[in-house]
Each structure stands twice: as C-alpha cells, then as structure tokens.
Image (spheres, rainbow, N blue to C red):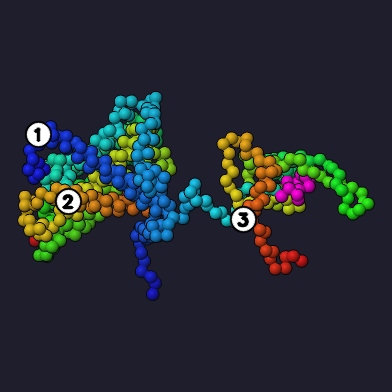
Amino acid sequence: MISALAVEIPYWGQSIFRVVGGLVAVLLPAGGIVYLFLFKMMSFMQSRLGPMEAGPYGSMQLLAEVGKWMQKEDIAPDNADKPIFKIAPLVVLLSTFLLIVVVPFGPDAVFADFDTGVFYFLAVGSISVLGILIAGWASANKYSLLGGLRAAGQLIAYELPMVLATLGVVIQAESMNLNRIIEVQNTGAIFGFGGLGNPFILTQFVGFLIFMIAVQAELTQAPFDMPIAESELVSGYMTEYTGFRFLIFFIAEFATAGVFAFIASVLFLGGWGVPFDWFGWSNIDDVDWWMNIVGPVIMATKMFALVGIIMWVRFSYPRFREDQLQTFAWKFLIPVSLANIAVTAILKVAI
Amino acid sequence: MPKPKVPGLIKGLGVTARTLGRTVKDGANTVQYPHEKESPPVRARGVIALHEDNCTACMLCSRSCPDWCIYIEGHKQLAPPRRAGGKPRQVNHLDRFDIDYALCMYCGICVEVCPFDALFWSPEYEYSEPKIADLLHDKEKLGEWMETVPEAPELEAGAGK
C-alpha cells in the first residue's frame, strides 16, 4: 500500500491510516446499505417513499436515527449479567471489524495480506455467534434466550455450507490468499478467451448460490430471521437492549452484510480487479498503482449489487419455520456443497 | 397450451421488483401528508356535521347514540303564525348540540336515525386537538362542517315514487 504511492509512512502513521480506513470500510457501506436498501428500496417495494423529511430525500435520516439512539437511556435488566450484557454488542461488532481486515480493496490496499485469508475470515466470522449467544443468555429474558439459542443453532448450521462453498473456490484458485484468488480470476480465461477473466461465479455458480444463501442466514435476514422473529420473540436476543447498545447491534447487522458482500465479490466476482488483459498486466505485481484507488470503487459497486440482492430477497420472502430452516441447511445445502467440492476437485485434477 | 409454471419464489421477487419500478416511475400509493392532503372518498365517514335549521331537538340521535356522546338542550318557544291572524306556533329551539368526538365511535346511527335530515357525514378529518376536552365540538363548529358535506347522490331510477 505504501510503496505503491512512493511515500514512506512511519509505522504509527500506517496504523492510523489502517484504523481510519477500517472505520470507513465498515461504517460507510453500513450507512449506504441502510439508506439505499432499508429506507428506500424497501419503501419503494411497498409502494411508499420512505423517510423524506430529514435532508434531501431523507438522506440525513440515518444521522437523525443515530442521534435518537444516542440520547436514549442505557438500561440493563435487574437480573442481567451486567458486564457480559454490556459487552455482547461490542463482540458482535468486533467480529465485523475483524472481518474487514483481510478484504483486499486493491493490489496493495489490504489491511493485512494473510496467506490464509479465507481461513481467517471463516474463523473470525463466527465470533459474532458468541456475541449473539451471550447477549441472549445475559439478558435474563426468555425471549432473548430463545432468540439467542435459535441464532446459535442457525449460525452454526449455516457456517458449514459457507465453509464448504468457499472450499470450491479455494480448490480452483489453489490458494487461500484473497488477493491471489482475485489474481487467478482476473488472469484466467474462459475456453481460451481472456477478455473477461474468469470470475468464479461462472465455474462455481452452485457454490455462489450456496454462499449467498448461507450469508443470508448468517446475517439473520428474512427468510432466515427466526432468531429475531419479531412476531413471536419480540426482537430475539436484542429485546433487552436500548439506546447505544441497540445501535451497535443495528450497525453490526448491516456492516456485516457489507463485509460479507465484499468477501463474496472477492471470491466469486473478481474482487477489485478488472481483467488484467485489458491493461496488459501479467500478474498482481504488474498492476498499476491507480488500481488502489479504482479498486475500492469497483469493490463498492459489486458489494452494493450483492447486498441489493440480499435485501431484495429479505423484503420479498416470509420467514422459514425453525425445523424447515435446519432441514434446509443440514439435508440440502451441506450435501449439495459437498457434491460441489467433489465435482470441483475431480474437474480440477482431470483438466 | 398452459403457461410455463414459474416457481413461486421467483414470482415473489418479481412482485417486489415490479412494485419498485412502479413506485419509481409513477410515484407511491401513499401521500406525503403534511405537505399534500389525502383526498378521502366522497362518502368517507370523517366527521358528523349538523344542519342546525333542520334540527327539532327531538333527541332521537342522542338516545340512539351507543356512547352517549351527543348532548342536546332545547326549549319550547313561540314562533310567529304561518298565516296572518293565526295562532302563534310552538317550536323547539335548539340551545346546545355538542358531539364529544373523544367518545364518538363513528357508528353513524345518529345520522341514520335523524328523521329531519339534520345530521350528515362529512369527509373532513383534520380536527384533532391537543387537549381531549377540546374534542367536544359545539353546534357552531358542527355547522361549519356542513360546507364540506358532499351533494347527496342521485336517487336510483324509480326510487322517488
């Protein structure tokens, strides 16, 4: 990141740069998603306009909402396990911030370039389960407990198809490094035609579908919103939370949607890259430095497209029943993703 | 040939997408209320208006009201005779006609029961008050709403006989 701009920045400067970058990369998409999809797309799909008063077309509504939440009293129930109750939303948000660490936004614009990036994000992504579970447990509330346990059951069930769907990509790219996966996609060729690269959505379409379904479930968006089923569980594990801590849950939900969409676009849509053929680059070290600036824009576009699909599904479908939800994961998604891995591996060796 | 069957899941996505397109193109079904007023249907039951001259203080509406929210006071007085040299007529004069809209449940029985066409439905709906006691509206206020009462619809053919 630093050498590309030909400036030497001391370590503390890089650290500040990374912190600010991480905040922007997590909060900006979250705000964009909430305004664009939650406020506007959902309203339009219900033939209404959504917030229109705060700012032009209600664009400042989110700031107003944040202000509203900040003012509210921070209440913890009497019987709650207070320190754990208070820390739970932060654990959920922490998972989101840890996820963004490995997402590459350009050839050098990576917070940390791990060789086992895929492994890392799969591991770190499940920390949010802990946050949700302790939120449900520490609230001392039946609804919260049920919601937390449902969430734990669901998130663990859908973690598996996600891991298995990612494996197909890893087998094909022969690497767990996310930047390497992008490089493979953008230097690849479809039957000898390299003009489009070879985004893995083409070869791993089943994997992509499974991954997106699993992401939908991981984010507890409808039709997988059993953990926060508001008609039966009030608000699931979030029931007892108010003010700032509820806001953190809310931010984490949509920030995680953004980060998972980033990861999906890295794994399946070619990430920040354009096909390297277009500019005559042969590998990732060849890529011109300006991709570090264009890359994030490309990533954001793909992210918003993917989140758009997630939200579209969310606004269209009713909720799964709990047993259907588990059956779908264990009896359908996992076998299909296992078959996907087998087929990918066979083709990889055979071709 | 039967139409090819589209899976319900895809159809559902289509419904929301089409609604989105329609909202962007033609605008929403909703109304941005404080800026533009919604126009309720002509025969909407917004508020009950009083045509004071028709009222004879017969108390039928007040007695039929399930909520007892109509308050009527009147007195008998003499009116000039219809023909010269006749006896002065005795009429009921309306002193007070209040409807407590905090109690009213908009059943419309009073409008139905009024034999002299003194009560009407008006589509007017903007009469909320900061204090609940202020929802007791008197006959002057009820009279003002008469202006918003729509014309009576045409009778059906043969109904006049």
Residue on which the image places disc 3: B43
Pinpoint the chain carrying mark 3: B
Residue B104 visible in the shown view: yes
Query: Which label lies toward us, 3 or 1?
Result: 1
Which residue lies most toward the front here? B84
Q: Are marks 3 and 1 on the same chain?
A: no
Which chain is home to disc 1?
A
Report x, y in % for residue B53.
75, 49
Badge 3 vs badge 1, beta-carbon distance below 8 Å: no
Residue topped by disc 2? A294
Magenta stretch: give its range.
Answer: B51-61
In the image shown, does B51 or A41 lie closer to the viewer? B51
Residue found at x 30% / y 25% = A83
Amino acid type for the residue under numbered disc 2: Val
In the rendered image, residue B60 lying in the magenta stretch gets the answer yes
| Of A113 and A115, the residue lying toward us | A113
Amino acid bearing label 1? Pro
Name the residue beneath numbered marker 1: A10
